[in-house]
Structures are given as structure tokens and as C-alpha cells.
Image (cartoon, grey):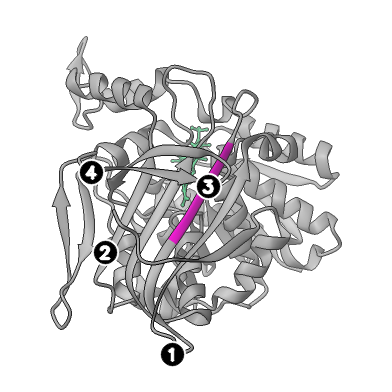
Amino acid sequence: MSKVLVIGAGGVSSVCVHKMAQVNKDGNADIFGEIHLASRTKSKCDSIAASVKKRTGETVATYEIDAEEVPAMINLIRKIEPSLVVNLALPYQDLPIMDACLEAGVDYLDTANYEPKDEAKFEYKWQWAYHDRFREAGLMALLGSGFDPGVTSVFTMWLKKHKLKSIRQLDILDCNGGDHGQAFATNFNPEINIREVTAPARHWAKKPGEAGEFVETPAMGKKITFDFEGVGEKNAYMMYHEELESLAKFNPELERARFWMTFGDEYIKHLTVLQNVGMTRIDPIKYKGQEIIPLQFLAAVLPKPESLGETTKGNTNIGVIATGEALDGSGEKTFYINNICSHEAAYEETGNQAVSYTTGVPAMIGSAMMVTGKWSGDGVFNMEEMDPDPFMDMLNEHGLPWQVKELDGPVDF
Ligand code: NDP
């Protein structure tokens, strides 16, 4: 029987822990066995544990930890002796938690790549630099096991395994058609969300036979209108998203890879004003003799993502459109693979809205892949390096069913 230690007690953690408990309750207690949950604010762990108990009857042990205090993390890991640490805190804690895992000799999983606090840089380089140390220690670190990154990479590799010999063009489309009834709120951690959407857009471009590169364009500079099944027509904006880096690395044939996310006009209007008045800055300013970071202050006054669950109605629709040479030799083909998730159903099941649900479920599945040994290896790995099939099966079984269809031709945007 394995033991897992989950770090962080936000919306994503709440879904992941509920799902782990459900797996245990369904008679697969050998997968997660004991569930331990630690975060900066213990009361948040306790309320997740109470909800899990009520919904599933399973027990979750809770602890207080500042994950940036590496010695304290090492002590906690040594005390619990888990076989896996599941990092669902914030991207800033990735490296300290990886350091603690190395020292304590335990595997690691996260859902978002490391970001330095003073720079909105979404790059894998810091975590990839840990590869040799994990390999030499005989440990595994799995990066980005959420939806995007996470499922989007698994979708892509499933298409490459079952439908396409190679992928020439890739578009990731992330639509949140949920309405939470607030003038402005973010569906996951506001600080991370706003850093992401205000950063310049970047997409992957490569001419055949040449080395590819990321092309930078202004944030929100390219817009399309797309008809999302289960949602309807929405405006989507091209932006940078971290899985583009690993997708380009593990699919060197890609000539173009882009990421699109939908935003309503109200969201853009509020964000533009906040940006214009300096509230999204991430450099410290002096206020009444104290240093504050405007974006952190803004995040503190915005609605908490976990508070939006009850009021959010509608669906998310996240998927991948890939064009390339068909595996069966029938020429160039285009496939669209996606999942539609209901905010109301996610809330009913776990007490959290669909953005947390679509991240927490893949975090649970990635954890299951690792503790059961279906995915294994020594070193630091991205989702693209693993067999997509068992992960795709679990998506269907655990609340994120997917569908794939052939399109008439490549996207025309
Ligand atoms: P939340 O802000 O809701 O939760 C983060 C949790 O981490 C909070 O409980 C917070 O504690 C805790 N935390 C913060 N700092 C520390 C620390 N130093 N030590 C211990 N705990 C800490 O975020 P979400 O649940 O929305 O997101 C969780 C992660 O998932 C983030 O990394 C996010 O980027 C990622 N994500 C990934 C997605 C994907 O598809 N791949 C999509 C959405 C999110 P406290 O309660 O005290 O504030």
C-alpha cells in the first residue's frame, strides 16, 4: 500500500484529494492507501479533509508546512515516508519541494512549471536542470500533470501514437465558458493567472529543415472567434503556455504550435484598466514604509477561486487540433481531441468548479500512474515522454471523458 503527501490546499488540491479518496473508496486502496495533506494554512487542509470524510468516508491526515522551508519539508517527508510528493502549491515552491524530495529520497509530481517570484518566466529550464540529480538518486519527477499543461500533452501524444505519424501543426484551445456572476475574478490563483495572461504571446515556428524558434508578439494581440461544443462562440486570444516548450522539444517535427485561451470582453476590459494603472506589476513598490507587490495586493482583494464554485455555471472545453501525416498512409489529416467539463457537475462532486476539477483530476491520475509503476523512470520527465494510453483510460473513468473527431482540413486561423 502506498502513501501520498499532497502539498497545497487550494482548489486543485481539493479536487485531487477528493479524487484520491474516491479511488480508495472504490476498492483500490492499494493505489493511494494513506493520503496526507500539508499546506501553509492548516485550517484549509482540515476543511478539505472534512469534506472528503463527508463525501467518501475516507480519512486525510493534515499538517502545516511552509514548503519553501526545505529542512521542514524534509522532516515532514521523513516523518510520513510517502512514496510520492504531489506538489499542488504554487509554482514558486517547485524547486524547494524538489530539493526536499531529493534529500528525503521520494518521487515528485507537479502541475505547473517553476517561476521565479520576480520574473513572469514560464520555462522548464530550472526543473530540467534537476534531471541528473533525480536520475542518480533513482527517483522520478513528473512535471505538469494538470490539464494544460498535462492532458493537452497527453492528447497530442495519443494522436501521435494512434492517428498521426508526425505532427506538422498544433493548436491548443482552452475555453472556459463558465459564468461566475462576478465582474472580474480568475478561476485559478489570481496572481499566477494574471502573470500568465499579461506576459507577451509566444508561439513555436519552424521552417522545414531549419531549427525552430519561439516568436514573440504582444500580449492579447491575436484574436479568433471559435465555436466551442458545449459552450458556443467565444473569442480566444493567442498567448504563451508552458507546454509549448515541452511539446516542441519532444515533437521536433512541429512547424507551428500555438495556444489559445478564451476571455470575455468584461475580463479584458478590467484587466486592461488594472494593467494601465500599474496593479499587475510584479516588482515591489514602497507603500506607507512597507514594500508591497501590486499584483499580490490585487490577488488579495479579488474573489478567491475556491469561492466561485457555487455560482459558476456552464462548461469548459479544452482540446488540441493537430494536423500531420496519417499513420495509415492516407495523406495529411487533421484531428480535434477535447474534453467538455461541467462546472455544476464538478461542484456537485467535489465542491470545486471545473477549472480546479480539470487540473486536480489529471494530478490524481499522474499520481496513480507513478505509484502503480505504469509510468516510471529515473530523472525529470514531461508528460510527452510517457505512454498516453493508461492515462487516457483513467481520464474516461474518473470524470474527464474525451472525444476525438476528424476535421475536414487544417485550421484556417
Ligand atoms: P490556490 O492559490 O487556490 O492554492 C495554492 C495553495 O498553495 C494554497 O493552499 C496556498 O496556501 C498553498 N501555498 C502557497 N504557498 C505555500 C507555501 N510556501 N507552502 C505551502 N503551501 C503554500 O491555487 P490553485 O489550487 O488554483 O492552483 C494550484 C497549482 O495548480 C498552481 O501551481 C497552479 O499554477 C496550478 N494550475 C495548473 C493548471 C494546469 O492545467 N496545469 C491549471 C490551474 C492551476 P494558503 O492557503 O495559505 O494561501
- Secondary structure at badge 1 equals loop
Q: Residue at x 42, y 76 (%)?
A: 379
Lower sequence index among marks 4 and 1: 4
| Marks 4 and 1, how far apart at CA | 34 Å
The amino acid sitting under disc 4 is Lys
Lower sequence index among marks 2 and 3: 2
| Marks 2 and 3, how far apart at CA | 30 Å
Label 1: which residue?
329
In the image, taking residue 187 as reference, residue 114 lies left or right, namely: left
Q: Residues within 10 Å of mark 1 (few under 14, many from 20)?
A: few
- Secondary structure at badge 2 equals helix
In the image, taking residue 203 as reference, residue 193 lies left or right, namely: right
Q: How many marks?
A: 4
Lower sequence index among marks 1 and 2: 2
Q: In front: 88, or 225?
A: 225
**Looking at the rendered structure, which numbered label has been put on residue 317?**
3
Residue 365 % position (x, y): 63, 62
The amino acid sitting under disc 1 is Gly
User: Is 49 covered by the magenta stretch?
Assistant: no
Q: Residues within 10 Å of mark 3 (few under 14, many from 20)?
A: many
Lower sequence index among marks 4 and 2: 2
Lower sequence index among marks 4 and 3: 4
In front: label 4 or label 2: 4
Identify the magenta region.
315-320
Q: Is mark 3 within 8 Å of ligand 1?
A: no
In front: label 1 or label 2: 1
Label 4: which residue?
222
| Marks 4 and 3, how far apart at CA | 20 Å
Q: Is mark 2 within 8 Å of ligand 1?
A: no
- Secondary structure at badge 4 equals loop
- Secondary structure at badge 3 equals strand
Label 2: which residue?
125
